[in-house]
Image (cartoon, rainbow, N blue to C red):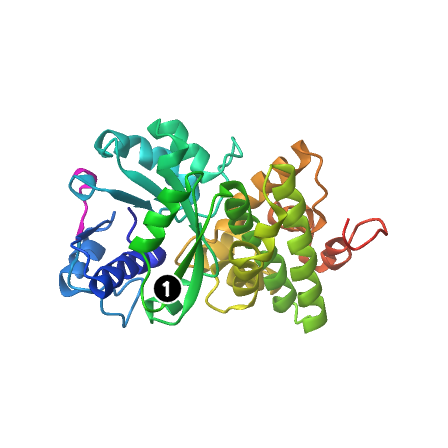
Amino acid sequence: MGAGSWGTTFAKVLGDAAATHGFARSVRVWGRSPEVVADFSRHRNVKYLDGIMLPEGITATVDPAVALDGAELVVLAVPAQSLRSQLAGWTAHVPPDAVVLSLMKGLELGTDKRMSEVIAELTGLPTSQIAVLSGPNLAMEIARSQPTGAVVACTDHETAQWIAESCTAPYFRPYMSTDVVGVEIGGIVKNVIALAVGICEGKEMGDNTKATVITRGLAETTRLAVALGADPITMSGLAGLGDLVATCSSKLSRNHTAGSLLGQGMDVDQVGARMTQVAEGIKSAPAVLELAQRHGVDMPITSAVVAVLKGELPVDQLEPLLLARQLKSEGD
């Protein structure tokens, strides 16, 4: 559900996995745009994955009822802030025994809920049928069949394993976890840290600065995850460190790109006008900070980014706040 770059790429992963392992499977994609959907008939999505050929078994439709009919696995790949409104219209068509997998990396504004929590609320499905996938998953690199790993998390290990088996392609290696909170928080906060690193790059700061922001960004991500009940070990894996490094370093990262534009002096509206896809960190950062404050978690980098996004702090004054903590041991 979602024909953007990541939704289309994951459909390709599922199609390639089926071809590799001989699964009898059809993959249907729902898209909002008739033009994008029509492009699938030529096994392409030129708007979001130009130059990539899609497996023949993938079809697309603008009708969510058609897309969801008889689905065993429902993959949600829409912007995080639109999930509630869109899923509310889809729930009647979601088969009651289907597994729902979230590819989204954001917190819902107003409720500060993770995407798995929104899914549970709207569908009424048990947690054993709700899963999340995260990791260093830059869509275009995966679409080009470049090797990458990911983590599938579900409270039910067997469900996570079934999903992992369904999306194991020659270039895509999923691992399993039951730490849904940790996997989601890693994918959410890394977008905010990537904005900070992008700002540093836009201001032409050096590698020492960026490495420090990435490392301390991982520390504050871990503090929040642990406060919410996550396993700290998750933050040293693909959904934590792996995703953080990829998103903070790559020119393909929307959040890194958005941060770089902010660092060059653009405001949030100008960045939005320049970019063709949503940078989730811009939308989720205030919710991340609110969640951290509610749990008494110190997140100076996130706080500084939010101040810039709200126009409360000129980007030229960001640097001192990135490391604005009292002197203490590195592990604290």
> Percent x, y for residue 166?
29, 54
Observer-nearest of 214 and 231 = 231
Query: Residue 275 falls in which quadrant of the image?
Result: bottom left
Give the crowd class for mark 1: few <14, some 14-19, many >=20 residues within 10 Å. Answer: many
Q: Which residue lies furthest to the right in this view?
A: 327
Say if the magenta span includes residue 243.
no
> Percent x, y for residue 37?
19, 54
Query: Residue 102 falls in which quadrant of the image?
Result: top left
Determine whether the residue tagged by mark 1 lies in a helix, strand or loop: strand
Which residue position holds label 1? Answer: 172
**Rendered position, 136 above or below 77:** below
Amino acid at dot 1: Phe
Q: Give the range drawn in magenta.
A: 60-65
Q: Can residue 206 be seen in this view?
A: no
Residue at (65% x, 67% y) in the render: 203
Observer-nearest of 188 and 237 = 237
